Image: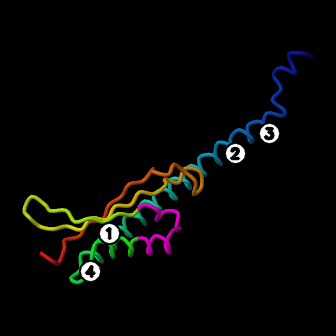
Amino acid sequence: MTRRRLADDSGAAVAEFVMTSTLVVLVFMAVVQLGLALHVRNTLISCASEGARYGARQGSSPEEGAQRTRDLIGRSLSESYAQDVRAEVQTTEDGVDVVVVSVEAPLPVVGPIGPSDGLDVRGRAFSEVQ
């Protein structure tokens, strides 16, 4: 009688289902979180590049480009991602002025929550004033 009970697999399907479904849910959540992190990163890069182009225009300043970047990030993601935005003019080796807009923002690790300095992105544009 005991050998028959040891060889019996009844009830194992429930345990297998729980373990498998837990693993599938965890993998799904990890993929969704990776997608969110990439979306935030790509949006920040796009906003920084647009701000650099705006600040590099004739009659505009890098500070206006930084403000434009803050506005775009605030509308696209959240104001919390636009806390640390800087703009400066750098000169290349060939003597060309380039407006660089830098954004440091939190990296979303668990939903939108994450370390405050996880992402550091830059947008660059050639200055029209040479």
Residue 16 sits in quarter: top right
Which residue range is magenta in the image?
70-84
Query: Which residue is denoted by mark 4 in the rendering?
Result: 60
Q: Which residue is mark 3?
A: 14
Estimate the x, y position of residue 42 in percent, counting from the top left. Answer: 41, 63
Residue that protrudes farthest toward the top in the picture = 2
Of circles 1 and 4, which is in front?
4
Can you identify the residue that label 1 sits on? 49
Mark seen at residue 62: none
Residue at x 8%, y 64% (from the top left corner): 95
Name the element at disc 4.
loop
Q: Are marks 1 and 4 in contact (CB under 8 Å)?
A: no
The amino acid beneath tag 1 is: Ser
Taking the magenta stretch, the answer to whether it contains residue 82 is yes
Q: Are marks 2 and 1 in contact (CB under 8 Å)?
A: no
Please name the amino acid that badge 3 sits on.
Val
Q: Earlier in the sequence, mark 3 or mark 1?
A: 3
Residue 5 vs residue 130: left or right?
Answer: right
Q: Residues within 10 Å of mark 2 (few under 14, many from 20)?
A: few
Q: Which mark is residue 21?
A: 2
Q: Is residue 3 or residue 15 the one in the foreground?
A: 15
Q: Specify which label sits upstream in the sequence, 2 or 4.
A: 2
The residue drawn where x is 55% and y is 53% is 33
Residue 103 within the segment the image draws in magenta: no
Name the front one of labels 3 and 4.
4
